[in-house]
Image (cartoon, grey):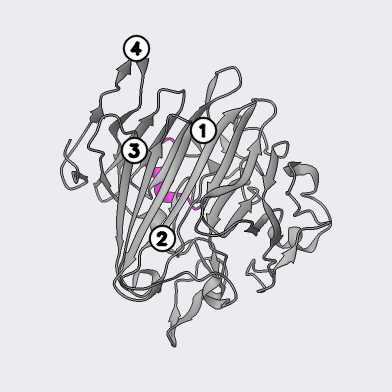
Amino acid sequence: MMRGFVLGIVALSVFSTEACKTNGKVQSSMKTTVFGKLPDGREVHQYTLSNGAGMTAQIINYGATITSLTVPDRNGKVADVVLGYDTIDGYVNGTAYLGAIVGRYGNRIGKGQFQLDGKQYQLAVNDGENHLHGGKTGFNKVLWEAILPDSSSQSSVQLRYVSRDGEEGYPGTVTLKVTYTLTDKNELRVDYEGTADRPTILNPTQHSYFNLSGAFGNTILDHLLMIDADSITPVDKGLIPTGQVASVEKTPMDFRTPMAIGAHIDDQDEQLAFGRGYDHNWVLKGAPGQVRKVAELYDAASGRMMSVLTDQPGLQFYSGNFLDGTVIGKNGIAYQHRTALCLETQAFPDTPNKPQFPSVTLRPGQTYRQTTIYQFSTR
């Protein structure tokens, strides 16, 4: 297959890069199938990445969404570890951002307002009085173009979306490319590359909900979590950062050593009350721009472990507080309270209104880049 072949422009039902075999061992492969159709008739494709080491990842070009991530446990039994839907209708009608790339701005912007180069901008407001995850029609609710790899040995797919000037109130036209790669080390790598034709802001993130037990009826309260951060950006009642940076020392936010998520989630704590649990940004240690390990999640029952590596300055840990059984997912399962969690690598929330936070401004001639890796193992 030639590089630059774009799905959605040329009609396609099934494309497969044949799995290679070395000494009888199956190596990486990529297969394309039709996942469904949007209400306007456009086809949505699903890309199944396999690495020959026991993992598969499935991604659709609607929302650049991870629909499935199958990972072996300590006994080699494979199970899906991310929430999702069985059909495209779930992703079209759903409001929980399951598995999607969100943006232009992941997380919240207070009152949907910000200034850039002296000009005031008003974004779409979709979370009370605030702007959340790109607005009413963010990156999670659009059809991306897909570019297939030019080698059968690559288990990857690149997705591209052009966000036009004025979309959801944002200035400038942004072109964003997101490349998913499944490596033979059981890593799902997510690489972002964005450009703009006018000064704007850009802060996309991946919004998968994880439950490493592989049983979506289980809560994640027994999962052990480590976050390599000494502080958080505390929030007000609307979950907008106050602008301060607060130590995690002697608070329920201290995950510097692995701790069960349920250990302090119901403590009498103002920040936990505001978030109805954990829904906060941790200020990651290490230099932004350098990929380093920032978090580790472990499920003792299955033995599955997920390490999160990123070059971003922040990590939003969300403990599934707003899941309430109304979201009906795969196999008809109703996703209940705290049955999954998100670990969203990002710049800080409301950064355009907090000059003391790391900048998210993107100007013509600059290239936005981000790398985040979800690395799986067992113990």
- Disc 3 + disc 4, Cβ < 8 Å: no
Q: Main secondary structure of the magenta part?
A: helix
**Which disc, if any, is residue 23?**
4
Q: Secondary structure at mark 3?
A: strand
Is residue 351 left or right of 104 when viewed as pictured?
right
The 10 Å Cα crowd at callout 2, few under 14, some 14 to 19, many 20 or more, is: many
Disc on res. 332: 1
Q: Position of residue 360 (x, y in %)?
A: 47, 69
Report how far apart the C-alphas of labels 3 and 4 lie in the structure.
23 Å
Where 205 sits versus 257, above or below? below
Q: Residue furthest top?
A: 24
The question of residue 91 being in magenta is answered with yes
Instruction: Give the Cα separation between the discs numbered 3 and 2.
Output: 24 Å
The mark lying in front, picked from 3 and 4, is 4
State which mark lies toward you, 3 or 2. Answer: 3
Q: Which segment is the magenta one? A: 86-95
Q: Which label lies toward us, 2 or 1? A: 2
Which residue is under mark 3? 156
Q: Which residue is mark 2?
A: 138
Judge the density around disc 1: few (<14), some (14-19), many (≥20) Cα neighbours within 10 Å.
few
User: Which numbered disc, 4 or 2, marks the residue closer to the eye?
Assistant: 4
Contact, CB < 8 Å: mark 2 with mark 1? no
Q: For the residues marked 1 and 3, what is the alpha-carbon distance in whole angstroms? A: 29 Å
Please state which of the two labelled residues, at mark 4 or mark 1, is closer to the viewer.
4
